Image (cartoon, helix red, strand yellow):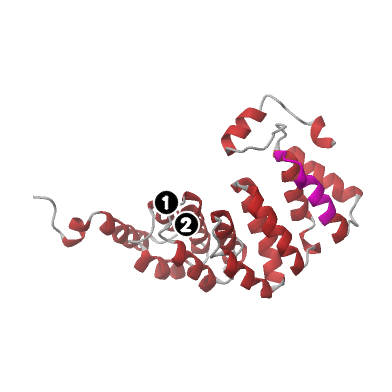
């Protein structure tokens, strides 16, 4: 296979350690994998949904990072072929991913556009947001990211998910809440500020530091003060230790 030709055993251990993964690594870089996907598009531009899903299943079955990444990249490249029924496949892949390297792509650039085309799938995201698997919960939020980044999207739904997860200790949940708030804050800082300020005392430092990046200086100061007041109550009342 094309991946074997580009393998670099010298870089494989570092990548495996970085992602803390149990998968085998060939040491193939992402540019080479994307080029392989472009070659498939050139040679099989008429790839239909059935063959796409079959190829993805074959690639994913082998516990090799690059093969699974190729499956994700193929789903991205041919995403318009997917139908609402394919949400079950995407959920299975997310559950088996166990790393942000797969989960974030599956959620943002594959599940997200599918949900935009098929709004009835929002009820699936509602279920994901209550799932026991934090990668599935993270995916529920990240699937809403792209339209929010464009100044559109369902911020109310995201806010409902995030409010429920705001006090979780899992880093990847805290980071994803801050990430979506940060990107939403580019086109709509007032909306993010109005949502975040009354919740700042409950939010983690990771979430807040991400979320305030595109707020005005005054908004940022207000959120940070509210966040710090929960950590240092004496400061909020004007009384320090005596």
> Does the residue at mark 1 contact the one at mark 2 (Cβ under 8 Å)?
yes
Residue 135's x, y, as percent? Answer: 57, 54
Give the crowd class for mark 1: few <14, some 14-19, many >=20 residues within 10 Å: some
Quarter holding residue 230: bottom left
Residue 83 at x, y percent in the picture = 78, 67
Residue situated furthest bottom in the rendering? 120
Is residue 61 found left or right of 207 in the rendered image? right
Callout 2 crowding tier (Cα within 10 Å): few <14, some 14–19, many ≥20 = many
Q: In this figure, which residue is indicated by the disc labeled 1? A: 206
Q: Measuring from the top left, give residue 234's x and y in whole percent.
A: 18, 56
Quarter of the figure that contains the N terminus: top right
Callout 1 secondary element: helix
Closer to us: 211 or 49: 49
Nearer-the-camera pick, 181 or 97: 97
Residue 185, position as x, y percentages in the image = 48, 63
Which numbered disc, 1 or 2, marks the residue that appears first in the sequence? Answer: 2
Residue in the picture at 86% in, 47% down? 40
Q: Tell me which segment is drawn in magenta.
A: 53-65
In-image side of 143 versus 1 (left or right): left
User: Residue 7, relative to residue 74: is it above or below?
Assistant: above
Q: Main secondary structure of the magenta part?
A: helix
What separation in Å lies between label 1 and label 2 (alpha carbons)? 7 Å
Is residue 59 inside the magenta stretch?
yes
Residue at numbered disc 2: 178
Looking at the picture, does residue 97 appear above or below residue 1? below
């Amino acid at each position: 296979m094309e991946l074997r030709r580009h393998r670099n055993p010298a870089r494989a251990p570092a990548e495996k350690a970085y992602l803390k993964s149990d998968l085998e690594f060939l040491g193939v870089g992402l540019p080479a994998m994307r080029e392989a996907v472009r070659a498939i598009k050139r040679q099989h531009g008429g790839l239909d949904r059935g063959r796409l899903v079959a190829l993805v299943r074959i690639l994913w079955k082998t516990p090799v990072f690059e093969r699974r990444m190729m499956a994700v990249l193929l789903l991205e490249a041919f995403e318009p072929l997917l139908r609402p029924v394919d949400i079950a496949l995407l959920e299975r892949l997310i559950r088996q991913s166990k790393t942000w390297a797969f989960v974030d792509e599956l959620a943002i650039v594959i599940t997200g556009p599918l949900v935009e085309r098929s709004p009835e799938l929002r009820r699936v995201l509602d279920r994901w947001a209550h799932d026991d698997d934090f990668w599935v919960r993270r995916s529920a939020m990240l699937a809403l990211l792209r339209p929010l980044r464009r100044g559109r999207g369902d911020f109310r739904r995201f806010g409902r998910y995030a409010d429920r997860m705001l006090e979780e200790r899992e880093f990847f949940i805290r980071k994803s809440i801050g990430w979506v708030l940060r990107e939403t804050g580019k086109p709509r800082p007032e909306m993010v500020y109005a949502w975040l300020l009354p919740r700042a005392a409950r939010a983690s430092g990771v979430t807040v530091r991400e979320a305030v990046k595109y707020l005005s200086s005054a908004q940022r100061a207000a959120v940070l003060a509210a966040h710090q007041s929960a950590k240092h109550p004496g400061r909020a009342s004007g009384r320090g230790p005596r």
